Amino acid sequence: MSSAGCGTGSGSQGNSGSSGKGDLKWWQLSLMGVGCTIGTGYFLGSSIGIKHTGPSIVFAFILAAIGTYIVFNLLAKMTAEDPQEGSFCYYANKAYGKWAGFSCGWNYWSSNILIMGSQLTALSLLSQFWFEKVPLWVFAAGYAVLSILVVLLGTKGFDKVEDILAVIKTAAIIMFIILAAAVLFGWINGGGGKPAFPSSTGKLFPEGFKGFWSSLIYAFYAYGGIEVIGLMAMQLKNKEDAPKAGKIMLILLLIIYVISLGLAVLLVSYDKFTPDESPFVTALNGTNLKFFPHVFNGAIIIAGFSTMTAALFGVTNLLVTMAKDGDAPKLFSKKLEKFKKLPLPSLGLAAAGLLLSVITALLLPGKIYEYITTAAGILILYNWAFIIISGLKILENKMWSKALGIFGMVLLLAAVSGTIMEKEIRFGFFISLLLVALIAIAAFIMKKKKWDKEQQTSG
């Protein structure tokens, strides 16, 4: 899963219009999008999906790509028609009023907090590859403190580092594809023979329809970050190229995801995959490529830490913007001169979210990753639902576009409802439901106390 950073620098959801012209070409945005979207949710989270559905995980990723394209296409069209820095939360406000913008902003903030928790846990699990006896919470605490220190230091050129690490992540996957193909065709010891393609429906869907249904959320989670690419579309030289950039980006992502996952499930039986290890490390465990797990693990930890820190930057700035717009307490808009004008109250709340993940890792070390990843994935889809319903109301859609939007909503609902089917991940659904309920209550209170007064004053 990508972060709210990766070349954006903020993740703002404010209502200000765009100023200045971008200089990005559409193909540059496509390549940046690929590098930014591939994250720990794919490198580790896809293992949970494979565990639930086996080789048919490939079909889950194809369906998720279609749903993701529908969301991005609507967002790109709204951006081209009415370019705004605040992107999807601005459009929710425009379509349905203040409550929608408020809910969208807080839902996005909550999803990013959970994403950071998911990434923090992923980094800790990956680190246990070398240090099995070290408790999960120790790694989680270490990475959390290190991430907060990086933000406090206000490292310049962080976006440039992000771009380099995006290349590392993509290169790691390409390295796996090349090595896995070599193993399958017998060029490297440990594979050999012809690829063992599933010969029956039972082998393709070993856990049945229920397993496939519950795996959809992890496929969607791997495409998470598409809304950030919507924000980056503001940097395009020609805003009209946004849909084309998104289409090419998703085709490239789909190719990378399908080939790499397809090779992984061909090399190893699906029941060998676990949420504690990257599926790509698991797939090559039986070979004589002793260097691969270490190199791959190291590359993903470095890139994953960068992604998490960028998310911390983004979520901190997001809350500042929300406070300025009146959607959060004014305290969170304050920046302290002594700390290089850093918004410490906003950073403090984000840090509290990371601390909660550390505590959860201490109490529930066995299930934390599945719970947090499921909840984070669901909240991302709630954001995407806002994009679809906003696009259907704001844009002058033809019948085909409306039908696509409705189909996109069906896919999102299928992914969310699939989490109820599996007892192991159901708790994540209830976490997301609790957060949405809290946001809804806050929106209702705000509407009664503040927004109604504003309307009466303006009237």
Image (spheres, grey):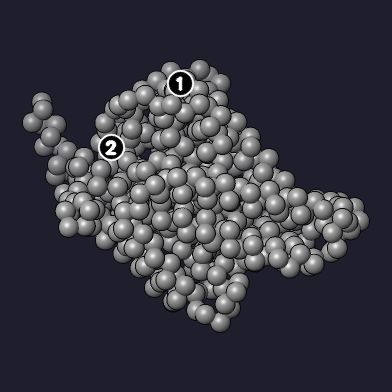
At x 33%, y 32%, the residue is 85
* Nearest to viewer (mark 2 / mark 1): 1
Q: Quadrant of the C terminus?
A: top left
- Nearer to the camera, 415 or 340: 340
Residue 144 x, y percent position in the rendering: 39, 66
Q: Amino acid at mark 1?
A: Asn
- Residue 402 visible? The answer is no
Asked if the residues shown at circle 2 and circle 1 are in contact, with their CB atoms under 8 angstroms apart, the answer is no
Question: Please, what secondary structure does the residue beneath circle 2 have?
Answer: loop
Question: Which mark is drawn over residue 238?
Answer: 1
Question: Please, what secondary structure does the residue beneath circle 1 have?
Answer: loop
Tally of numbered discs: 2
Residue 205 x, y percent position in the rendering: 74, 53
Residue furthest to the left in view is 457
Residue 162 x, y percent position in the rendering: 47, 48
- Nearer to the camera, 161 or 424: 161
Residue furthest to the front in view is 156
At x 73%, y 50%, the residue is 177
The earlier-in-sequence mark between 2 and 1 is 2
At x 25%, y 43%, the residue is 321
Question: Which mark is drawn over residue 14?
Answer: 2
- Nearer to the camera, 289 or 320: 289
Instruction: Tell whether 144 sits left or right of 256.
Output: left
Mark 2 and mark 1: span between their CA atoms? 22 Å
Residue furthest to the right in view is 193
- Nearer to the camera, 347 or 390: 347
- Residue 132 visible? The answer is yes
At x 52%, y 39%, the residue is 33
Query: In which quarter of the view is residue 67 placed?
Result: top right
